[in-house]
């Protein structure tokens, strides 16, 4: 490949309207070959709509989307051949065995029998499910199912893998495993990954992140660069009188504070400072009566989101839908 | 500019065109059959209902059933057998069409929709799969024929199949069309109560067209399922002297009506599915 990385996904001024609701208000981005690219935002921000348009499941109202050189509106068949998709909701047939599911997918993508058989061996090994391949999916754990979903999405060797909230409802250990797997996949196969998430810690696995809120991209950068937008470390103080402490800090340290000082939830005061280690002893020494406890941490993408949009990514917003999904997954898990 | 190299390298080995569509139809059909074979419990469940109907209704009801001058040798359970056969095809076929609501709800459908397969192939694959399962259920039911005093030979079985296939295709098509217009399971209940139950009860499965009140006869004559049940009954009563009193139309006419119905229902399901899943 040349010096220039090729854009596998090009999105230009993408808009989508559902009746009166403007779900996407002009979104533009490019994803390079081999990149892991994240769309981050609360539920309803427009991530899933974007993904559905890219996967040819929803028609855009305006704008242009090119994927692997195919236009999503004019050449949907080309786009469909180029992508593999892992959905937020389980898409496996639980009454079929793992192998039967993979056979079903590969034949739908038009793989000849012999090729399908080879690919199935490959992907089953890749997700480490060889010894369970002849078992029904209804007997699988949540993590195994996700792995099989990913295997099914890869069986036709797509250039781009879409992951829609890939680890919702999984325990931390399984999440980590899935991430290791995705990164490994990118390294070995050069697959480009586009994922959506409303989990901040997940977004940190991406090379670049587009932060979406209310149908617009409010920031697009690497996780590290996004974090730098927050003014350094986050220092959280608890105080018997938060209001007074905020005033006092502003008065004494206002000039040197790059970031901001504000009251947090409950009795908290939150300060952003370039060096927490240097600032904490000074602030503690200055107002011993106003400070009960101190903690310092690196900024997370939650802080970034809060900073960029003025509101937090709240899990309650997602709650209902996620709970329903979880219930659906568990219910299907019982094998009907 | 996008390099053309990306584009070519991105094309997997898949071939396009008719061959590809046919393979997709076959694959969707194959999945429905695997599910049928994988789930013996469900298969048994589907068989229990007809057996109950035949056993309880057929025998119990038959004891008191008095058609206007019952002919010599008439047994109600024999009369009801084609009705139960029709019922099995009706429920199995319609359910498999409507199961698309579930598949949409639980994401299964999306996996099919993002595959490079035309919408027409998806509908045809599902319709063929559902119909095959329905006809298989019906065929299994034929094993009970001796219990209902129904004599079968190869010719009759073939003629029963000839009637069951278009019935099954029509009803799966109808189910698919309903599923394409609907998202909730609540709506499905409404359909069951106001469409399927009346369709079943007014199909002539339990009582003949002849001798019912005028309004009911009109309803039965517009009910497409009536012609399917009549076709099946015609085969069961082949060569019986009083057949004319129990069977309304000849086989060819019934078959033509049911086939027309299948074509209309499949066309409708194609149109509604395409409109919904762009």
Image (spheres, coloured by chain):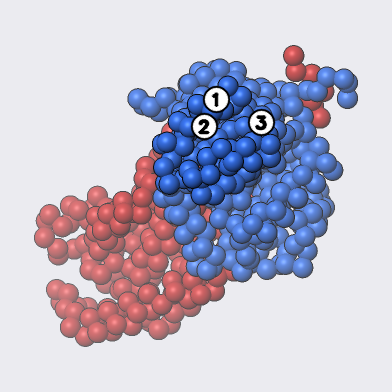
Q: Quadrant of residue B238?
A: bottom left
Out of B124 and B188, give the one closest to the viewer.
B188
Label 1 marks a residue whose chain is A
Which quadrant of the figure has residue B240? bottom left
What colour is chain A?
blue
Give the chain letter at badge 2: A
Q: Residue at x 37, y 74 (%)?
A: B49
Which chain appears red? B
Q: Quadrant of the N terminus of chain B?
A: top right
- Give the distance between the C-alpha atoms of the residues marked 2 and 3, in whole angstroms: 15 Å
Position of A10 relative to B207 (above/below) = above
Q: Between marks 3 and 1, how big is the CA–CA gap?
A: 13 Å
Q: Position of residue A177 (x, y in %)?
A: 72, 55
Q: CA distance from mark 1 to mark 2?
A: 7 Å
Q: Which residue is mark 2?
A: A249
Q: Quadrant of residue A256?
A: top right
Task: Tell me the element at label 2.
Answer: helix
Q: Position of residue A107 (x, y in %)?
A: 69, 48
- Kindly indicate whether the residue at mark 2 contacts the one at mark 1 (C-beta within 8 angstroms): yes
Relative to A276, is A199 on the left or the right?
left
Q: Which residue is mark 1?
A: A254
Residue under numbered circle 3: A274
Q: For mark 1, does the 10 Å Cα neighbourhood hold few (<14), some (14 to 19), or many (20 or more) residues?
A: some
In the depicted view, which residue is nearer to us: B24 or B267?
B24
**Which numbered marker is on residue B242?**
none
Mark 3, secondary structure of its residue = loop
- Residue placed most toward the observer, B244 or A52: A52
User: Which residue is found at the position 25% from the left and 70% from the top?
Assistant: B206
């Amino acid at each position: 490949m040349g010096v220039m990385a090729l854009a596998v996904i090009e999105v230009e001024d993408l808009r989508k309207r559902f009746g009166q609701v403007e779900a996407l208000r002009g979104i533009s981005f490019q994803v390079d070959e081999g990149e892991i690219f994240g769309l981050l935002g609360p539920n309803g921000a427009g991530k899933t709509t974007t993904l559905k348009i890219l996967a040819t499941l929803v028609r855009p109202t305006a704008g242009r989307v090119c994927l692997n050189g195919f236009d999503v509106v004019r050449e949907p068949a080309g786009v469909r051949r180029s992508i593999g998709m892992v959905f937020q909701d389980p898409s496996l047939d639980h009454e079929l065995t793992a192998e039967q599911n993979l056979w079903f997918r590969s034949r739908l993508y038009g793989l000849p029998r012999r090729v399908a058989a080879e690919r199935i061996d490959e992907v089953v090994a890749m997700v480490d499910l060889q010894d369970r391949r002849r078992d029904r999916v209804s007997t699988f754990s949540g993590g195994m199912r996700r792995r099989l979903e990913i295997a099914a999405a890869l069986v036709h060797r797509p250039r781009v893998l879409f992951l829609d909230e890939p680890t919702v409802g999984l325990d931390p250990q399984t999440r980590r495993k899935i991430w290791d797997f995705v990164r490994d996949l990118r390294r070995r196969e050069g697959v480009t990954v586009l994922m959506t998430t409303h989990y901040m810690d997940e977004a940190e696995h991406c090379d670049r992140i587009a932060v979406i809120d209310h149908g617009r991209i409010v920031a697009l950068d690497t996780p590290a660069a996004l974090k730098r937008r927050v003014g350094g470390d986050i220092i959280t103080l608890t105080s018997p009188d938060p209001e007074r402490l905020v005033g006092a800090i502003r008065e004494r340290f206002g000039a040197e504070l790059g970031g901001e000082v504000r009251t947090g939830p409950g009795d908290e005061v939150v300060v952003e400072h370039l060096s927490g280690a240097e600032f904490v002893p000074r602030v503690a020494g200055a107002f011993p009566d106003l400070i009960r406890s101190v903690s310092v941490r690196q900024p997370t993408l939650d802080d970034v989101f809060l900073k960029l949009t003025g509101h937090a990514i709240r899990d309650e917003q997602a709650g209902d839908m996620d709970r329903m999904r979880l219930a659906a997954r568990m219910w299907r898990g019982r094998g009907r | 500019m996008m390099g053309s190299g990306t584009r070519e390298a991105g094309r997997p080995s898949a071939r396009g065109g008719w061959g590809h569509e046919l393979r997709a139809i076959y694959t969707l059909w194959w999945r429905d059959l695997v599910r049928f074979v994988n789930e013996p419990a469900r298969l048994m469940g589907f068989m229990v209902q007809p057996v109950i109907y035949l056993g309880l209704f057929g025998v119990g009801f038959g004891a008191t059933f008095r058609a206007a001058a019952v002919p010599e040798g008439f047994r109600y359970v024999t009369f009801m057998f084609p009705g139960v056969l029709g019922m099995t095809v009706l429920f199995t076929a319609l359910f498999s069409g409507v199961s698309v609501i579930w598949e949409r709800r639980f994401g299964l459908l999306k996996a099919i929709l993002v595959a490079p397969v035309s919408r027409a192939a998806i509908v045809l694959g599902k319709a063929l799969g559902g119909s095959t399962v329905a006809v298989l259920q019906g065929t299994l039911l034929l094993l009970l024929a001796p219990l209902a005093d129904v004599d079968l030979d190869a010719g009759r079985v073939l003629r029963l199949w000839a009637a069951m296939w278009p019935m099954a295709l029509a009803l799966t098509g109808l189910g698919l069309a309903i599923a394409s217009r609907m998202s909730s399971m609540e709506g499905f209940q409404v359909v069951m109560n106001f469409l399927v139950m009346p369709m079943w009860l007014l199909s002539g499965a339990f009582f003949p067209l002849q001798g019912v009140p005028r309004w009911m006869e009109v309803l039965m004559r517009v009910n497409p399922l009536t012609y399917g049940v009549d076709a099946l009954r015609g085969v069961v009563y082949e060569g019986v002297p009083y057949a004319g009193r129990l069977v309304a139309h000849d086989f060819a006419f019934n078959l033509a009506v049911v086939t027309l119905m299948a074509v209309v229902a499949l066309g409708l399901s194609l149109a509604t599915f395409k409109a919904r899943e762009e």
